[in-house]
Image (tube, rainbow, N blue to C red):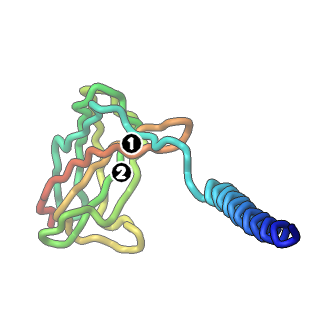
Amino acid sequence: MRALLRSNKRGVSVIVGYVLLISMSIALSVMVYNWLKFYADDKPIETCPSGVGLVIKEVKCDEKSFSLTVQNKGRFTVDGFYLRVNDKIDSEFGFYSEIVDKEIVPSGDVEKEYFFANNYGGVTLTKITLIEVQPFILNKGEKVSCDQVTRQKVSCP
């Protein structure tokens, strides 16, 4: 009879070990989940509505400046755009940027003049080979960049 009781005690200790192992695994997974949820951004990504579209209507250049006319060909009002330019030949993207906070209604346009002597991120440009325009809208005071980017190769002095 004693032998039977001893074997039952061994069986109970193995079960207690498995229960402890499973409960520790669950507790650790809950702690890791709570720790990681602070690092994950669960806010939805804001995007522009489809149908937003800016085009570069006209570019005029002279020795000291260039003039840019941007037109809103989309269905929605745009709150402004990012202007990026590059001075390298055969560049694929704009490098020097400036923000234009000017509302453009559908079918409306805006004209801006930029002087080469202006400081673009610490660099004074002498020529421009690429102009890039990316619209943005304001949502709760924050600028939301649109996916649509318009590029035009130019040859300004």
Circle 2 SS class: strand
**Whether residue 103 is situated above or below residue 17 in the rendered picture:** above
Residue name at image x 73 percent, y 60 percent: 19
73 and 126: which is toward the camera: 73
Circle 1 SS class: strand
Task: Give the residue pinned by disc 1.
Answer: 136
Residue name at image x 47 percent, y 37 percent: 138
Q: Amino acid under label 1? A: Phe
52 and 103: which is toward the camera: 52
Is the residue marked by circle 2 packed among few (<14), some (14-19), or many (20+) residues within 10 Å? Answer: some
137 and 156: which is toward the camera: 137
**Whether residue 49 is situated above or below residue 21 in the rendered picture:** above
12 left or right of 73? Answer: right
Q: Quadrant of residue 124?
A: bottom left
**Whether residue 46 is situated above or below residue 154 in the rendered picture:** above
95 left or right of 55? Answer: right
From the image, which quarter does the N terminus lie in?
bottom right
Q: Quadrant of residue 77?
A: top left
153 left or right of 100? Answer: left
What's the CA distance linking mark 1 and mark 2? 7 Å
Q: Amino acid under label 2? A: Tyr
Q: Quadrant of residue 4?
A: bottom right
Label 1 with label 2: CB-CB less than 8 Å: yes
The number of discs equals 2
The image's mark for residue 82 is: 2
